[in-house]
Amino acid sequence: MTPIQGISPVIPAIADRIAPVGAAETSGPGGFMDTLKNAIGKANDVQIQANQAVDALVTGQSSDLHGTMVALQQADVSFQLMMQIRNKLVTAYEEIQRMQV
């Protein structure tokens, strides 16, 4: 089974930066923020490629319906992944806000 090319760069980028539990080190200043920005940027790139594939199909520049549908599915999966990451971050933030100091 081959990985979906649209999200395959996103998942390792996040997984490579996640520190083991209890590790106090970061991968430099703003390590998590940089990783998150890169993941969002890659998801955006996949969305742009899917839009370009649809535009090429609609204007007749391409007749690759299969490739266009694959690009759309990659964009959809990439978007869903980013939404789940966002939901987890919001949940974690809300839980931290409820903590008593």
Image (cartoon, rainbow, N blue to C red):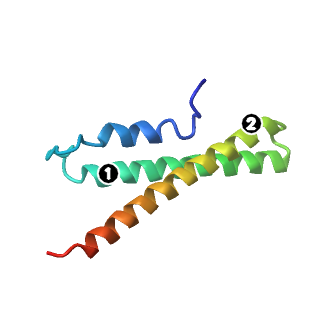
Please name the residue shown 41% across and 59% down the image: 88
Q: Quadrant of the C terminus?
A: bottom left
Residue 18: x and y in percent read: 30, 43
> For the point 68% across and 52% down, which residue is it?
51
Which is nearer the eye, 17 or 43? 17
Q: Residues within 10 Å of mark 2 (few under 14, many from 20)?
A: some
Q: Residues within 10 Å of mark 1 (few under 14, many from 20)?
A: some
Image point 16% across, 43% down: which residue? 23
Q: Residue at x 56, y 48 (%)?
A: 78
Residue in front for this viewpoint, 98 or 60: 98
Q: Quadrant of residue 92?
A: bottom left
Local secondary structure at mark 1: helix
Q: Is residue 20 left or right of residue 61?
A: left
* Quadrant holding the N terminus: top right
Which amino acid type is marked by label 1? Answer: Asp
Question: In the rendering, at what x and y percent does residue 84 appear?
Answer: 49, 56
Q: SS of the residue at dot 2?
A: helix
- CA–CA distance in space, label 2 to label 1: 31 Å
Residue in the foreground of this view, choosing between 69 and 87 = 87
CB atoms at circles 2 and 1 under 8 Å apart? no
The answer to whether 28 is drawn above or below residue 97 in the figure is above
* 16, above or below 28, in the image: above
- Identify the mark at residue 61; answer none if there is no mark: none
Q: What amino acid type should be assigned to the residue bearing mark 2?
A: Gly
Q: Which residue is mark 1?
A: 34
Q: Which residue is mark 2?
A: 67
Q: Position of residue 30 (x, y in %)?
A: 24, 54
Q: Is residue 88 left or right of residue 71?
A: left
